Image: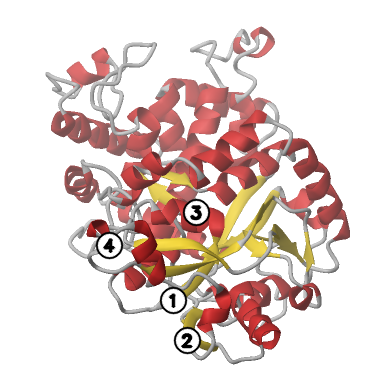
Amino acid sequence: MIRFIFLCLSIFILLSCNDDNTVDIEKKQDSRNFKDIIESGKIKAITTYSGTTYFLYRGRPMGFEYEILQKFAEDLNLELEIVIAKDENKLIEMLKANKGDIIAYGYTITEERKKDIDFSIPLYLSHQVLVQKKPDNWRRMKLHNIREQLISNPVELMGDTVCVKRNSSYAQRLINLSEEIGGKIHIDTIPGEMTTDEIFKKIANGEIKYSIVDQNIASIYASDYPILDISTKMSFSQRIAWGLRKDSNQLKDTLNQWLKRAKKTVDYHVIYNKYFKNRRSFRKRVKSEFYSLNDQKISPYDDLIKKYANDIGWDWRLIASIVYQESQFRPSNESWAGATGLMQIMPKTAEELNISNPTDPQQSLRGGTEYLSQLWEAHSTIPDSIQRLKFTLASYNAGLYHIKDAQRLASHFDLDSLQWDDNVENALLKLNKPEYYNKDFIKYGYVRAQEPYKYVKEIFKRYEHYQAFITKDSTNTGETF
């Protein structure tokens, strides 16, 4: 039965996930207006994987667009759903097919694109630069000798070939430049799935001669490729914004008003600097084995997590999400309440689970997964497996008997005591108030209700991120999907 939960969970995630590889973008859905977004409680943003937009690092989703989107969604009291476009050339198609509400991507505002979509106010300004390789012996050369062997003026590209993506503003710039200089610059289109990091690697390796990238993005990537030159400007400053459907006037107005306020805050500039100016942090991320664009790893404890997840028949990525929630993969972490280790197990529970050293990753994961299995069995009366999982997670955080109290309170208010979403979770939120936790049928009193409420939501949301970035491990036989 425990394995059945993950089959159901997989179906649930697949139904809620919009991936352009699995959904026919030509199938037109009804357009979502701002009222639909508010009523659904969710805003859907289309973006791509990249080292500045959206990625996973040490178990945590990150990226400029991702962080700004999170703040926008939180201010509107909305859940954020990320919709991945694996082919950058399909961003506008996906937006027009209503696969998302916003293109949250560093999109240059161009007249050609304005025929198809609207834009937010600019998030920032940048100009385009040529990315080219310096001579192999550049470190032993004088600066003026290096410059002599590089393209220093776009006119010098006449008759040469530059590799860019088909629907990019860079391709349009090359077309316009050819007309301006009265000579042909050839365009070799590269796949829309190719990341900026891959483009830089190919130029550094000599597989691509030239490409064009926005200066702020080029600057941060070039810090990891000193052999590349990005000093040749290809355009004036251009406005970088997010895209919206032409019928999204209210969403556009709301987003623009929010961006005007946000751009005046310190937080906004801290986030911008983190992804476009902090070269040291960037280099640290891109060299890490726990950077999702490098490897299929979440933490240093993946192998142990897989072993014990397999023992109880759970997807290891779900267990990893729980571990991150509990300790951020730090085995020496200790909570204010005295819980310790990767799975933050309380001393009394550790004793019952025969854990002699809670800071030992192996003991903590063995005990924590065993305890999760016990709590799963304790909720055997919950008929829906997804809801049963949520009861299990809430019990791990708040304690089984506080959740039983929440079920009793739910029944008192004529809510469904076997349904977590919008029922028991709402009853639980009342158990931090005396008029509720002092009722005669409440046996275990006060509970810090916001913690388990958020705990369940955050683990599920992070699990979705992990599923997006980390593929199923075929050796983890406990997984059913």
In primary-sequence order, the first of circles 3 and 1 is: 3
CB under 8 Å between callouts 4 and 2?
no
In primary-sequence order, the first of circles 1 and 4 is: 4
In primary-sequence order, the first of circles 1 and 2 is: 2
Is any atom of residue 86 visible in this view?
no
Provide residue 15's location: percent of width, then percent of height: 54, 65
Q: Is residue 385 left or right of residue 441?
A: left
Question: How busy is the neighbourhood of tag 4: few (under 14 within 10 Å), some, or many (20 plus)?
Answer: some
In primary-sequence order, the first of circles 2 and 3 is: 3
What residue is drawn where x is 57% and y is 24%?
450
Find the distance from the CA under tag 2 to the CA under tag 3: 30 Å
Q: Where residue 30 is drawn, which disc sits there?
A: none
Circle 1 or circle 4, nearest the eye:
4
- Which residue corresponds to mark 1? 210
What residue is drawn where x is 50% and y is 43%?
277
What residue is drawn where x is 65% and y is 7%?
434
Classify 271 as above or below 251. above
- Which residue corresponds to mark 2? 161
In primary-sequence order, the first of circles 4 and 2 is: 4
- Which residue corresponds to mark 3? 54
Q: What amino acid does circle 4 point to?
A: Trp
Provide residue 383's location: percent of width, then percent of height: 48, 49
Q: Is residue 302 left or right of residue 209?
A: left
Classify 454 as above or below 126. above
Find the distance from the CA under tag 3 to the CA under tag 1: 25 Å
Q: Is residue 133 left or right of residue 152?
A: left
Provide residue 354's location: percent of width, then percent of height: 13, 22
Q: Where residue 138 is drawn, which disc sits there?
A: 4
